[in-house]
Amino acid sequence: MSSSNKLTFTVQPGGKLQGHLRVPGDKSISHRSIMLGSLAEGVTEVSGFLEGEDSLATLECFRSLGVKIEGPTQGRVTIHGVGLHGLKPPSGPLDLGNSGTSMRLLAGLFSGQAFDVTMSGDASLSKRPMRRVTEPLALMGARVETTAEGTPPLKVHGGQSLRGIDYVMPVASAQVKSCLLLAGLYAEGSTCVTEPAPTRDHTERMLRGFGYPVKVEGATACVEPGGQLTATRIDVPADISSATFFMVGAAIAPGSDVTLQHVGINPTRIGVINILREMGADLEMSNEREVGGEPVADIRVRHRPLRGIRIPEDQVPLAIDEFPALFVAAACAEGETVLTGAEELRVKESDRIQVMADGLIALGVDARPTDDGMVIQGGPMGSATVQSHGDHRIAMSFAMAALRASGAITIEDCANVNTSFPGFVELAAGAGLKIQQR
Ligand code: S3P
């Protein structure tokens, strides 16, 4: 472990959040902009790109595959697309760091190439389940090896002829859906993926933005091979998952009033808004517009006391990355909050049910983890040292908890905040959070 992995946040209690803030670009859209821009014919210009470690891992990966990419410079990236069949074999294994999205989507994309690719990742990614993509890819005729446990590294054997499948996903996962649609660009016949509940649809939207037809009927998305992607411009909105920390911070801290600017409000991502509103939060959207096929808005959040709720299960996939922060909101709410149907949280960058419960309990909160969620009684929070387990969203959630704690919160192992939110400490401190890092 390098010394940078030892980064610690110390957050003094109290304070409030204020100001107009723009959080960094959407991680999911940033990954896809590099992938599709590389496979397109012509030059794609991206603005608002997330310069975080995860999306930069995807960018470096395509450079290793022979794609000329300029930037990022202040969020601007220029991608000289090589076409669907123009990628070159990399000179060695690709290291995707902490990024599950890169690995799962690229497993599909690489299955359609003529060459072999090996992908590895950091300690967290090396524990994450990959059979959810390798099994359906095998049904398409792909050959992707994992460890005996079904975890990375992944070795993707190129030169296979893929055939389209009709796949009904057992879990609601945008990563699995996207992986299969990308493999489908290279398969014979149509590839259709049916999801058990709506998940983020950035891949479908962006394929269309590049002029590649995607047929969506109800819960099923289908692609046919033989099309081509045509270079385009992409304006990446601010990431609603990063905005979430400020939305929750402002909702729980008396006197707060923040406006998050240019936030992506794709209907498959707004679970956090729906859940916070049901808890009684004062959230106001303005300046709603559409930018490059994705809806965006400014979101103003002012403090108002929250109440505990039973979180509707249909909101779970729409807020899947927001639960660490929502657990903090629940701890600050009046009454009980119950989450069920969220077992996926156990296989994210950390086991987000256990790790959040451990931290909340250390802070004196009555938090009871269950197999598929948590039961939290709102109440006072004290002071503690909590472990983020290298999970960016856990670190940022406990940082916001300090706004309502009676003593300082120290959060260990915070370097991975840079995977999704470079500049978090500076932005949060500027808005009023009493945060320091060392
Ligand atoms: C993502 C999909 C989600 C999400 C992840 C990003 C994507 O994962 O948790 O942070 O960009 O497709 P799952 O598809 O595994 O739920």
Image (tube, helix red, strand yellow):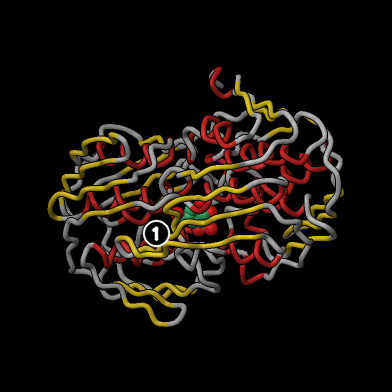
Residue at x 27%, y 41% (from the top left corner)? 76
From where the camera sits, is residue 130 visible?
no
Residue 206 vertical placement versus 329 (above, below) = below
Is residue 53 toward the left or the right of residue 413 in the image?
left
**Quarter in which the C terminus is drawn:** top right
Is ligand 1 closer than 8 angstroms to the Cβ of mark 1?
Answer: no
User: Which x, y percent locates residue 192?
Assistant: 38, 74
Residue at x 63%, y 53% (from the top left corner)? 302
User: Which x, y percent locates residue 98?
Assistant: 49, 38
- Identify the image quadrant of residue 229: bottom left
User: Which x, y percent locates residue 228?
Assistant: 17, 64
Instruction: Give whichever of 45, 227 is nearer the camera.
Output: 45
Residue at x 60%, y 39% (from the top left corner)? 391
**Quarter in which the N terminus is drawn:** top right
Residue 366 vertical placement versus 89 (above, below) = below
Task: Please give the residue where the numbered disc 1 appears in the rendered image.
Answer: 179
Instruction: Give whichever of 331, 184 is nearer the camera.
Output: 331
Residue 71 vertical placement versus 354 (above, below) = above
From where the camera sits, is residue 403 visible?
yes
Label 1: how many Cα within 10 Å (few below 14, some 14–19, many 20+)? many
Which type of secondary structure does the marked residue at label 1 adopt? helix
